[in-house]
Amino acid sequence: MDIQTQTEIIRSFRFDRSQTASQGYKRILIQLFGFLGHGKSSFINTCKYILDGGDYVNHAQADSSDAGRTTARISYPLTDYIMLVDNRGCGTMNNYETGEIFAQLANLLPLDQEVEWSRGFRLVNRIVEAETEILKSDFTFPVFLYSIKMGIDEEHIEELRNLLETAQSVTGVFPFVVLTHKSHGGLTVVERAFRDMGVGKLFILENYTPDDHFKKRGRHEDVLRFFNEVIKEVEFHLKHAKDLAQEFKNHKQLVLKFIFDREMSFSSQTEQNTQAYMVQRMESLRRKSEDQRNEDRQYFEEEMKRIQEYFEELRKKDNLRFEEEMKKYGQYKKNKNKDCILQ
């Protein structure tokens, strides 16, 4: 299939006019998520460049370094029925950042607003407050972007696996994975790692950038194939009857449970840390008390030794003085006897 035909299929996609066929959905919301600086903004610019057909425009304010500037959840319409959403990238996939990501993937938070990493149950309040602004007719489609040039550590694989599986739970779709920086070394290792995580749809491509946007057939084909697969996946899911309101409710409950479990775990960990600190502190005090007793005992022994040495010195001086006195007395007595004889 040539590029023009593939492009036309994507541009002409729409949910069927029949309510039964569309099940009430009106547009596809392709939710991009991942780490900071892995190419989400560049991917958005690339997609719009290819589908719009005009000049390259830096819509998402990406730069050549992929430094990760996005701090808001921003939407970018591609057609009347397909929209890309650039979710704020995570520095680390801790439970506060991923909680926010899951709420966005489940479409529980409004578009085009700043993203905050909410601690405590603040995120729950934001979800409740935003419910009237959410379009339940959006088909949310999760797409995880990962840069090949970042490599992948064995210790993070299980963390990523859990992230992808949870994303599936809160959207009903296992995430497509897009690996960026195709020409960078290390592709085989990263690709195999994601395959081992159970990723079925993996796309490897090179983004266009402000410094590199000369049109290349291969890049166009990679991106167009991605969108055609998204459409096929959506159509597959539409073959199974869905209740939009119930789907929304189920996904919201999963996210709320994640937040609740997170806070309970944090509270439990805090309590454990407090108990551990108290035990450590008591042990420290005990050791300090023991050390103090040892110091006191040592001081007492040294004092006793000094006193004994002092009295021993006095005894020696007294003996010496007594001996001298006795010598003087003996000499005196001898002289006295001599005087008596002379008389």
Image: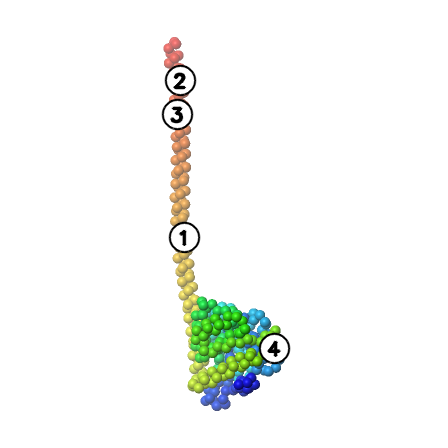
Label 4 – label 2 distance at C-alpha: 128 Å
Q: Earlier in the sequence, mark 3 or mark 4?
A: 4
Rendered location of residue 158, percent (x, y): 43, 70
Q: Amino acid at mark 4?
A: Phe
Mark 3 or mark 4, whichever is nearer to me: 4
Q: Earlier in the sequence, mark 1 or mark 2?
A: 1
Q: Earlier in the sequence, mark 3 or mark 1?
A: 1
Q: Secondary structure at mark 3?
A: helix
Residue bearing mark 2: 332
> Farthest residue in the right direction?
55
Residue bearing mark 1: 285
Q: Amino acid at mark 1?
A: Leu
User: Who's the residue at 51% across and 76% down the image?
Assistant: 204
Q: Earlier in the sequence, mark 3 or mark 2?
A: 3
> Farthest residue in the bottom direction?
18
Is disc 3 surrounded by few (<14), some (14 to 19) or many (20+) residues within 10 Å?
A: few
Is disc 4 surrounded by few (<14), some (14 to 19) or many (20+) residues within 10 Å?
A: few
Residue bearing mark 3: 322
Rendered location of residue 121, percent (x, y): 46, 71
Residue bearing mark 4: 214
Q: Which mark is residue 173?
A: none
Q: Is residue 158 above or below residue 294?
A: below
Q: Earlier in the sequence, mark 4 or mark 2?
A: 4
Rendered location of residue 290, percent (x, y): 39, 49
**Direction from residue 168 to residue 40 in the image, left or right:** right
Q: Amino acid at mark 2?
A: Tyr
Q: Secondary structure at mark 1?
A: helix
Q: Is residue 260 above or below residue 134?
A: above
Q: Secondary structure at mark 4?
A: loop
